[in-house]
């Protein structure tokens, strides 16, 4: 089979059917890794073949979950470039998470250099424009051995990449969500506001249960009053009522999503009123449109929300007008089919 040429002059992988991409792992060629000790500076790391690593059985990350991850995407654009979307925000969020989990924060310059290097080394795995993106997964973990519950003596920062398509089954169609009345994602004073790896495993059982019952994901309510929407699995929540956009305010238990922040800025630039506030399930279920958002989820329209015996269907299950407009604007910027008026794109040097 002849290799596909992409506009950037390099070869694109032939092993992938770009039209069937889902949000799943395809091993790529190259990853990045660097290590440091507690209280020592991070030094730039190096590229190496993607593959298994050896780690101490007593590693802090394995025993006590001392680890963080990030999620970013590299896109091919209409201008024949490869770009990141606001990568500095991912670097800063990981630094805030490192403070919370008592790990040495990776300097922004090391973080950006790492993600640029890995993407440049895996160009052939970046899907053609409009078919998906190269998902970039930075990980920071306590890799040194420790027995008592305390910070590990040494740390690893690594970055791997994988081509991805839509996060939810069925692509960009409206999803059906179930409000979890039994489980919570985060509690005040906990780690819900950072991307701690330990935040995610407890969501797997509720999520699987909801999927088995025919829903795409669960919506979590706040752990104090059990009445306000916090997040949709691993994505932020928005709803539109009487022309005003509402999203749960950042109280420390919600992850400050970069997509969330971008949508707020885009909507305000469009002249819309956006209110960050407590959004009760009751209010959300009386809204005109709803969607969730994130790097993986992009903007996913919500077709229905179920809470116990009650079910709200939005717009007959068809994505709402404002939801669709925001989706088009966000993805237009990311693919450079619309101007990047906010200066959000960061070009990846590819030679
Ligand atoms: N909420 C949670 C819990 C997440 O894991 C993510 C994904 O990163 C998001 C929200 C969305 O954040 P972002 O838009 O920065 O990807
Ligand atoms: C992301 O949107 O990048 C996430 O991290 C969500 C998920 C895949 C955990």
Image (tube, rainbow, N blue to C red):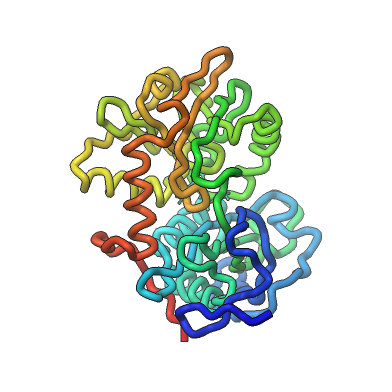
* Placement of the N terminus among the 4 image quadrants: bottom right
Which residue appears farthest toward the top when viewing the image? 309
Q: Is residue 47 left or right of residue 346?
A: right
Q: Residue at x 45, y 22 (%)?
A: 281
Q: Residue at x 47, y 59 (%)?
A: 95
Count of numbered tags: 0
Name the quadrant containing residue 337.
bottom left
Residue extending furthest front?
1
Q: Residue furthest right?
A: 57
Task: Looking at the picture, tell me which residue is in the foreground, 213 or 145.
Answer: 213
Q: Is residue 41 visible?
A: no
Q: Position of residue 105 (x, y in %)?
A: 50, 63
| Residue 218 position in % (x across, y down) | 58, 32
Residue 19 point in image, percent of width and height: 58, 59
Can residue 84 be seen here? The reply is yes
Q: Position of residue 143 (x, y in %)?
A: 69, 63
Q: Name the foreground residue: 71 vs 293.
A: 293
Residue at screen point 40% across, 75% down: 81
Q: Is residue 80 left or right of residue 338?
A: right
Q: Is 113 situated above or below 185?
A: below
Kindly identify the residue that appears in the image at 64 percent across and 76 percent down.
Answer: 30
Name the foreground residue: 32 vs 68. 32
Give the left or right position of residue 99, taking residue 266 as reference. Answer: right
Horizontal relation, residue 100 to residue 1: left or right: left
Task: Tell me if residue 301 comes above or below residue 6 in the rendering.
Answer: above
């Amino acid at each position: 089979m002849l290799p596909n040429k992409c506009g950037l002059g390099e070869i694109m992988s032939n092993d992938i059917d770009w039209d069937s991409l889902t949000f799943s792992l395809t091993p790529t060629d190259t990853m990045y890794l660097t290590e440091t000790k507690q209280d020592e500076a991070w030094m730039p790391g190096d590229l190496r073949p993607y593959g298994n690593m050896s780690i101490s059985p007593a590693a802090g990350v394995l025993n006590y979950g001392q680890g963080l991850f990030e999620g970013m995407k590299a896109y091919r654009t209409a201008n024949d470039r490869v770009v990141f979307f606001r990568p500095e925000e991912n670097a800063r969020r990981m630094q805030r998470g490192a403070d919370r989990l008592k790990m040495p924060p990776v300097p922004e310059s090391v973080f950006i250099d790492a993600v640029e290097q890995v993407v440049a080394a895996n160009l052939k795995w970046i899907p053609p424009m409009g078919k998906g993106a190269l998902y970039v997964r930075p990980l920071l973990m306590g890799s040194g051995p420790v027995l008592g519950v305390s910070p590990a003596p040494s740390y690893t920062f690594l970055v791997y990449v994988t081509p991805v398509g839509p996060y939810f089954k069925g692509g960009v169609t409206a999803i059906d969500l179930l409000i979890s009345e039994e489980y919570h994602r985060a509690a005040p004073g906990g780690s819900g506001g950072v991307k701690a790896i330990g935040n995610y495993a407890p969501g797997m059982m509720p999520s699987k249960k909801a999927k088995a019952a025919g829903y795409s994901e669960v919506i979590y309510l706040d752990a104090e009053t059990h009445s306000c929407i916090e997040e949709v699995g691993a994505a932020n929540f928005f709803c539109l009522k009487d022309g005003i956009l509402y999203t749960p305010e950042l109280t420390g238990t919600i992850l400050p999503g970069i997509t969330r922040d971008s949508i707020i800025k885009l909507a305000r630039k469009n002249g819309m009123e956006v209110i960050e506030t407590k959004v009760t399930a009751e209010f959300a279920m009386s809204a005109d449109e709803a969607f969730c958002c994130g790097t993986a989820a992009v903007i996913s329209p919500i077709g229905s929300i179920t809470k116990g015996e009650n079910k709200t269907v939005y717009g007959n299950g068809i994505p709402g007008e404002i939801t669709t407009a925001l989706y088009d604007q966000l993805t237009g910027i990311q693919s450079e089919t619309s101007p990047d008026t906010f200066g959000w794109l960061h070009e990846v040097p590819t030679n």
